[in-house]
Amino acid sequence: MPQEKITTGPRRVVFPTGNFISPGGHKVHTVHTVTTEQWEGEELVSSETVNVDEFHDIFAHTPGWDGPEDNENSWPERGWIKFLDKTWTIVRDDDIGFWGFRNGEPLTKQQWLEGVQAKNRAGIEAGAAAGWWNIDEQGNPQKLAAKFSIAALAAENKTLMAHLMVDLGFFPSVSQARKNGWDKPLELGRHELGPKKKRAHVEIVP
């Protein structure tokens, strides 16, 4: 009768990926392998290895100061926290100088984050202006959509979603598209159409 042997590899941290974390709670993502072998006597019959993801909660305590907290000459200290194979440096949100400077003044984490977000927004808007992507209602980039006008399609006697599905190449005829549930009027807005391996992003405008 076959004998089963299970071997578990060491857990390793894959997130957070950096070397610094802020005080407070964090979710740590680890991965380890589990290998299952089937043996008949001394002969290996089969072997299968899978990756196992696990998530763990840790808490990083806020470091103190290198002197009295109310002393203007005191500086925030940094701490350390270790979990399995990973060690992080704990950095306070008000760690002087760590988050950079603006006009000669040290930034807090919140000010640094606001700067990063503003830079990202500017980059997203520039990409949209260059025609690289669209922007959704939340301000996030999304795959560029081909625009179709209801008025232009109507001028060609195309009033149904079935007509659009044929134009996109998903069906060879309007009748077949209608049989597959596309017998409905053209719908304004952005749509992701087609099978998973061949999606089309379209925006239907008036």
Image: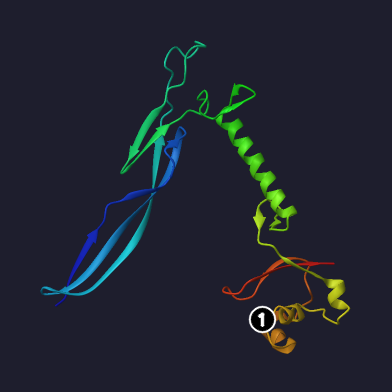
Res 85 → quadrant:
top left
Q: Which residue is identified by label 1?
A: 170
Quarter of the image that includes the C terminus:
bottom right
Residue name at image x 69 percent, y 44 percent: 122
Q: Residue at x 66, y 52 (%)?
A: 140
Q: Is residue 202 above or below residue 103?
A: below
Q: Is residue 103 above or below residue 53?
A: above
In the rendered image, residue 202, in percent from the top left (x then y), is placed at: 72, 68
- Residue 74 location, x and y as percent? 47, 14
**Horizontal side of residue 164 vs 99, given as left or right:** right
Who is closer to the viewer here, 140 or 181?
140
Q: Quadrant of the N terminus?
A: bottom left
As drawn, 123 above or below 80: below
x and y percent of residue 116 in the render?
A: 61, 39
Q: Is residue 174 left or right of residue 27?
A: right
Q: Residue at x 66, y 81 (%)?
A: 170
Q: Label 1 amino acid?
A: Phe
- Quarter of the image for residue 19 reads top left
**Neighbour class for label 1 at 10 Å: few (<14), some, many (≥20)?**
some
Query: Is 167 or 206 nearer to us in this picture?
Result: 167
